[in-house]
Amino acid sequence: MSGRSRRKLCLCLSLVIEATCGAEVGYTRASTHKTAHEKKTEHAHEAHKSRDAEAGRQENILVTSERRALLPRVTTSATKTSVPVELTPQAITVITQSRMSMLNSRSLSEAVRYSAGVSDYGSKDDPRGYFGTIRGFSPDIYLDGTRTPDAASSQSFSIEPWGLEEMDVLRGASSALYGSGQLGGIINAVSKRPTRDLVDELAFQTGSYGRVQGAADVGGAFDSGKTLLWRFNGLIRKSGTYAINIKNNEIYVAPSLRWHPDEQTDFTILASYEQLDAGSTAQFLPAVGTVFASPYGYIARDFLSSDASFDVYSKRQAAVGYSFVRHLLPNWTVTQNMRYAHLDLAYRFVTTSALSANDKTITRQALLQSANYNNVTLDTRSDVTFHTGPVHHEVLFGVDFRSDFMANRRGQGKVASLNLYNPVYAAIAWPTYATTTNSNETETDTGIYAQEQVSWKHFYLTLSGRGDFTQSLTVNNLRNGKTPQNNNAFTGRVGLLYQTAIGLNPYVSYATSFQPQVGLTYDNASYVPTFGKQIELGVKYKPGKLGSFVQNFMLTADIFNLVENNVLTTDPAHTSFEIQTGQQRTRGFEFEGMGRLPYKIDFIVSYTYQDPRITKTTIAGETGQRPVAIPSHMASVFVQRDVHFGHDWAAGLGSGLRYTGNTAGSLPETFAVPSQLVWDLEAHLDYRRTRVQFNGTNMTDRKYVSICTRSVACAWAPGRAAFVTLSTRW
């Protein structure tokens, strides 16, 4: 062997050893076995490298570990094909399981923290679901590439972080591939799946709010050839919340089975069941006594505006589906994803109607609600790659179908007023069932989409287009009325990125969105669809020759302008209903970075400036106003470092700050909710494959208001919370 060959071999071995050690230090579970998707990713990556070589560029040797660090190498959510993150002409944040574990993400709201452009509504944890925004608009939630039940917030499909491999936050319009959806973006959760070399894990957690939780992630093979694999994720929790006497108990199981008989076929069955017994932490308190002091001081942070003996949020949800990948030819792949989801909901809550003249008592209304929801999704696509001379093509064709059915029943009635500073809870008179709302809603959406990804030299062009054909029927059982709706639309996207030799990749994109609005206003008028458009200019920086200076490192920055018409907002005269105010736009700037700095310091940093405005509305005084609860400024930074003590012992310390600017507390903006600065802390101690980890949020126990949506709908943020997790792997 020549000296040059020996040097190359030593370099490759050292890189492999460094990547393996780094993965062990990161204390995450991953498989070294390559799935069909990962092999397709490698082929795509190799194609990019070969095109670079054809252009005369020097090839860099880079060993990375898929889903073992803060920054993955590729993403499939943005284009439904395997493309390196730095070559995708869209702002994307991929939240790996490593990141969720490091930050102890107990919910979807906590998982998206430290991400640019994303608001979690002031750290207000709520068992009912996610109520934040992306670029000023509520996002759509996807699971494994297909949309979860598209219902009102209290009927949302729960996403359990323990059962996820990663979460992809796509900022901006994605209708060109995913169909009807919000303009601001989507959050796509990716389920854990069986792998041949899975590392099993057990975890136990305790801490604030009387939390006791056990979790397991185990798997294996049924045969010696490891062609039939299984995996089981499970979690059981008994816990309270920061709101007094409000529970957050959960049972979650997610079995999966994978058949991988050869390199061309990959079939995985994914199932899950969740039983959630909780209440609502969305306390409806007046601004006087929270944002401002009242003559009696401030309302207690754990004050319950509802009633512990009445408040219930009980949900049972189940889902089953599959993912099928077949490589017909080396350059031709067919993929199909399907899921059926069902949920039943029982929801009781007491909300605030008004504040008395003496600023001491609130008048209230009790809500009694039940819902039954069925959702079916099916996405089938074909992906072909080929060359025409020096131009590389990747052509995607697909058809997807979604069907939703919801039976919604709701009663509402007045109950006894409550003293804010000396509460005496009287028995709640239950409202008559289904007297306010009694409706059945059915919606289907069939979409046909196509995409062409062209790369030539250092240019990467993405062209996407989709036609949607939607039908819906709303049956009002109280009025014996039926409201059919048919809405068809075409949406598209064009993006162009230029890859430079130093890893600085500027891009520009234009995209549109479309979303039918199923339902009726208080006046029994059907909603019309929302239509949106977005322009985005950005740059991504990922050094091509990382060496020992930085690892797994990328910076992104972008500016954007979004405009959406026919936006739904709360009806001020009938707060249980919504109206369409006309038009809303958001302009802004985002910056995000993550990776590993010298001395093995991991970091996440982000900054967001956005200017959301209501530009057209029929409501007097709201034109030009900020929508409620959407901050104009957000910034965050988190750093963490591990230190080793011999071969068996290691320790780490991490700390983060999250800043959220002030928000409008009402429409029109008669008052603002002050800005927030929260300090988080993480520390861990490892002995071989056993870890003890501490996570704390709001470590200074700062008392602040997380959100107001009107003058009597404010909520305190949680105080200091601390959790200890003991986990072991084998």
Image: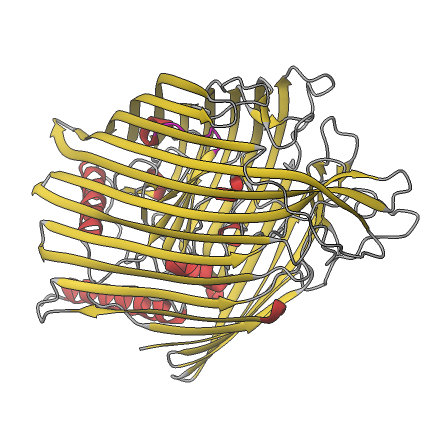
Q: Is residue 470 above or below residue 503?
A: above
Asked if residue 687 can be seen in this view, the reply is yes
Residue 650 spot, x, y in % from top left:
46, 78
Residue 101 spot, x, y in % from top left:
45, 63
Protein image colouring: secondary structure
The answer to which of 492 and 642 lies nearer the viewer is 492
Kindly identify the residue that appears in the image at 32 percent across and 30 percent down.
177
Asked if residue 724 can be seen in this view, the reply is no
Magenta stretch contains residue 182? yes
Residue 301 spot, x, y in % from top left:
75, 57
User: Can you say which quadrant of the picture contains the N terminus?
Assistant: bottom left
Answer with left or right where residue 575 lies relative to residue 13: right
Kindly identify the residue that appears in the image at 62 percent across and 67 percent down.
209
Residue 639 spot, x, y in % from top left:
55, 60
Magenta stretch contains residue 479? no
Q: Is residue 90 above or below residue 637?
A: above
Magenta stretch secondary structure, dominant: loop
User: Can you say which quadrant of the picture contains the C terminus?
Assistant: bottom left
Q: Is residue 463 above or below residue 335?
A: above
The answer to which of 2 and 88 lies nearer the viewer is 88
Q: Which residues are magenta?
A: 179-184
